[in-house]
Amino acid sequence: MIRELTALTKRELLRVARNPQAIATSLLLPILYLVLFGQAFNLNNIGSLSPVPIPNQVFLELYRGAPSYFSYFSAGMTGFVAVTATLFIGANVIFDRLFGTLKRTAESPAGPTAIFGARLLAGIVQPIGLAFLVLGLSLLLGYIGLNGLHITASVGVIGAAEIVGAIVILSMMFASLFIAIGFSLEQPQTYFAVVNAINLPVLLTSAALYPWGILPDWLKNVASYNPITLAVNVLREVLFAGASSYYPYGAGVYLLGLFGWAVAMFICATLLARRALSPH
């Protein structure tokens, strides 16, 4: 199985590399969010409208230790991109079925596990790359006179590993789910209807975009268990000095929770993919 998995993964990676237009298009949404949404919603400016100076501690509690809304938002956008970029991975499965590529692959000696695994391994490369590009762009904006990401903590090897782990696990879990859905459905319209019914509620009930301090209690309770929230909590605790005092758990606990989500989702995705790829 290893040989088939390696060959299929290489083929999928080559297909991604030969389509730079898709990569460039994928960057447009996060760039627009960072340059427009992130720059416009700078809640720190509210202080200039108040006749009484607002203590900095208020904003720290609002952003859970992040120095500004944009810094808080940048970490959230990293998780946001890691999820939204996986949508198109499952769509590629649909188009391969329509063009007959999937049928020829399924008739090869490679089994369902190798086919699913190759799609997953090759598919997570782009979401992970986009997530780190968002972090890099967020830092760059601060050097050209705009609101930018300000890292206030000393990020060591362990902290960097926690950030990488959170992004990889988040990308892999949603990529596996959307690929499995792609194997299970036949029409692109149905696929995008299903994944949007999953994707949008998950994104909008997370702490990726909203300042935590303004969320109602019921949404805080929901967001606390959201896998995107768990991932961005890791990033924020690592990137911002003193942020851990605004979170009930350390970054390691959130990583464990994210890993638990990933295992459950991967099992469901594997069962869906094996059922779809098994001979009928």
Image (cartoon, rainbow, N blue to C red):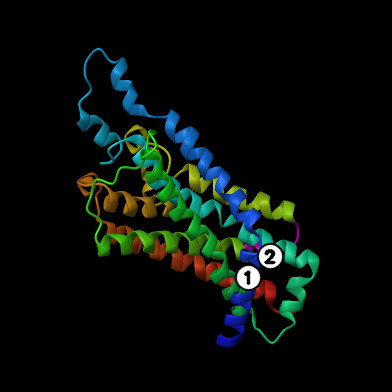
Q: Judge whether 1 appears above or below 253 on screen.
A: below
Q: Is residue 184 magenta?
A: yes
Along the line of sight, the residue nearer the viewer: 142 or 92:
142
Q: Judge whether 257 appears above or below 223 on screen.
A: below
The residue sitting at 59% across, 74% down in the picture is 118
Q: Are marks 2 and 1 in contact (CB under 8 Å)?
A: no
Residue 73, quarter of picture: top left
Look at the image and give the residue range highlighted in magenta: 181-187
Q: Mark 1 packing: few (<14 Cα in 10 Å), some, or many (20+)?
A: few
- Which quarter of the figure is the N terminus placed in? bottom right
Horizontal relation, residue 109 to residue 50: left or right: right
**Residue 221 x, y percent position in the rendering:** 36, 44
- Which quarter of the figure is the C terminus placed in? bottom right
**Residue 262 x, y percent position in the rendering:** 45, 65
Q: Which numbered circle lies on residue 14?
A: 1
Element under disc 1: helix
Q: Is residue 1 visible?
A: no
The residue sitting at 76% across, 75% down in the picture is 103
Element under disc 2: helix
Which residue position is annotated with label 2? 93
The image shows a total of numbered marks equal to: 2
The furthest residue to the front? 144
Q: Please tell me whether mark 2 or mark 1 is closer to you in this view.
A: 1
**Residue 156 x, y percent position in the rendering:** 24, 60
